[in-house]
Structures are given as structure tokens and as C-alpha cells.
Image (cartoon, rainbow, N blue to C red):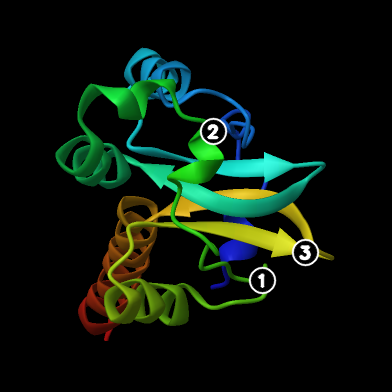
Amino acid sequence: MTVRAFIGDGRGEIITAGRNDSVAAVVALLADKRIGCVPIVDDGQVLGIFSERDVIYGLQREGAALLDKPVGAVMTAPAVTIAPDTSTLSALSLMTRRRVRHLPIVEGGRLVGFVSIGDLVKARMDRIETEVDAMRAYIQGT
């Protein structure tokens, strides 16, 4: 299975922010949508990722002044991205190696999807359960 399955999978729109949005505005967006991070996008291209970790580290470094800065100044960049034909196992491996929990899916230089480690683990578990059920049915059928 590839991450292409997560593109347009009915989870709704990809929530993004622009590099000139204030940190305070993006923090409010994260809270409002109950999400942990957003890709920072300009004209469809992923410039970076802004996450809860960026908020924590930024507040420790700069205090409340962080909230007035543009998110582009404090985002994690460049973003680690994957192509739609990346296997779910390769994406999970990349996330583990790079210590990230979200990956933008990029095709032709443009953001086409966004996947979390939770999405990938769930897909992997679903596939394992399906294989176990098939094996069980095969064994019981003989």
C-alpha cells in the first residue's frame, strides 16, 4: 500500500497556513481544529511545517514575543516530504528516522495530501488484521 490512499480519502481539506500568518493566529488554528501541526504553504508549495513543538521551543527561547512573529520565521524548514508512490512502511520508517509525526505528500512540487503517523499505523494494523482474518478463514476451511 502506498500513501496515495490518503490523498482525497474523505478526511476533508488539508489545513494549511501561510508563512506571513502570525504565530498567534496559527496557534489559534491548531487549537480550533484540534490538530498538532500544519504545513506552511505558499502557492501550493510546502515551505515548512509548524507544530506544537515549534511553539514550545519558541516560547522557551523568545517568550511571549514569539506570538507576534510570522510563522515562517519559526517553522521547521525545509519540511520532510514524501511522494504519493511512497509505501506506508517506507513512510513510517522515514518518520522514525527523522523523528517527525507528519509528512506532507507532494507531487509535482505541490501539496496533494498530508499524513500522520497515526494514519499510517492504523492503515498498517487494518492490513494486518485483514491478512490474519484471511489466514484464519483459509485454515478453518481446510
Residue designated by label 2: 11
Q: Quadrant of the N terminus?
A: bottom right
Instruction: Report helix, strand or loop for mark 1.
Output: loop
Q: For the point 57% across and 71% down, which residue is it? A: 2
Report the front residue among 9 and 102: 102
Q: Please tell me how crowded label 1 is: few (under 14), some (14-19), or many (20+) other residues with Cα within 10 Å.
A: many
Q: Nearer the viewer, mark 2 or mark 3?
A: 3
Q: Residue 8's spot in the image, x, y percent?
A: 68, 42
Residue designated by label 3: 107
Q: Which mark is residue 83?
A: 1
Q: Which amino acid type corresponds to the residue marked 3 in the rendered image? A: Glu
Q: Which amino acid type corresponds to the residue marked 2 in the rendered image? A: Arg
Marks 3 and 1, Cα distance to the nearest angstrom?
A: 6 Å
Q: Residue 6's spot in the image, x, y percent?
A: 57, 52
Q: Residue 85's spot in the image, x, y percent?
A: 67, 75
Q: How many marks?
A: 3
Residue 80 lies, with reference to residue 15, above or below; the image says below
In the displayed structure image, the side of residue 130 where residue 84 appears, left or right: right
Residue 119 lies, with reference to residue 107, above or below; the image says above
Mark 3 touching mark 1, by CB under 8 A? yes
Marks 2 and 1, Cα distance to the nearest angstrom?
A: 19 Å
